[in-house]
Image (cartoon, rainbow, N blue to C red):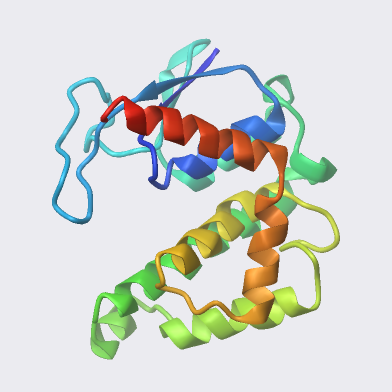
Amino acid sequence: MITLFHAPMSRSGSIVWLLEELGVPYETKIVGIRRADGSGARDPVNPHPHAKVPLLVDADDLSSKLALSGSILRTNTARSRWGRPLANRSEANTCPGSSIARACSSPRCSAAASVSSTSLARWAWASADEVEDVHDRHLASRSYFLGDEFSAADVLVGGGINFLMMAKVLNETPTLKAYAARITDRPAFRRMMERDAKGLKLGR
């Protein structure tokens, strides 16, 4: 059994979504985290060394703890005993999407937080506008991130795009808005949102 340490309305929501899409059995442990607005605190229940989420533990291998969204995505879509790759995509097709997600969200969020262009250059990040334009042009010619079929890349990359638009950090271009509407109009996404709503009632 997979155990996911998860905080509602956080980046770990994408992993709940992924597991729901894969249809694999898993258990969720709701934990508190330190939030960007200064609220929250380290949760002693969370075994993550920095008290962050997501953290995924495989009961069949307790020494195996995955704490990065990209690593969780690649492992879950690659292991046949944990389920099939979404839309029958291979791990090779999934990996680029998980890597691009990091390149998409980090510079966009940093620029929105008034990080200077010098700092962005120091970290070898593209500007926020450039990243936004690349994704907008990429998705203008296809329904999903990797083509005509929904894949795990849409969970990680698309989920980030949807979140950033909701937070008013990413501009709602017609292309990105239509894309976000497509990927969130799925039963697995709705189940994830329902789980988060229940988790918030626990006050964690």
* Residue 39 percent location from the top left of the image: 15, 46
Q: Quadrant of the C terminus?
A: top left
Residue 4: give x, y in percent of width and height. 45, 26
- Frontmost residue, 172 versus 78: 172
Q: In the drawing, does residue 85 fall left or right of residue 47?
A: right
Residue 75 seen in the current view: no
Q: Nearer the viewer, residue 79 or 9?
A: 9
Q: Which quadrant of the view contains residue 122?
A: bottom left
Against 26, residue 160 (above or below) is below
Task: Give residue 29's position: percent from left, percent from top.
Answer: 38, 21
| Residue at the image position 52 percent from the left and 47 percent from the top | 70
Q: In the figure, 103 relative to 122: above or below?
A: above
Figure check: 113 above or below 88: below
User: Toward which corner of the image does residue 90 lie, by quadrant?
Assistant: top right
Residue depicted at 38% across the width and 79% down the height: 124
Total marks placed? 0
Q: Position of residue 82 (x, y in %)?
A: 67, 23
Q: What residue lies at 46% left-to-right and 75% top-to-bottom?
A: 170
Image quadrant where one finds the N terminus? top right
Residue 123, can we see it?
A: yes
State left or right for residue 143 relative to residue 41: right
55 or 204, which is in the foreground?
A: 204
Snapshot quadrant of residue 175: bottom right
In the picture, measured across the screen, residue 134 lies left or right of residue 146, that is: left
Q: Residue at x 25, y 32 (%)?
A: 32
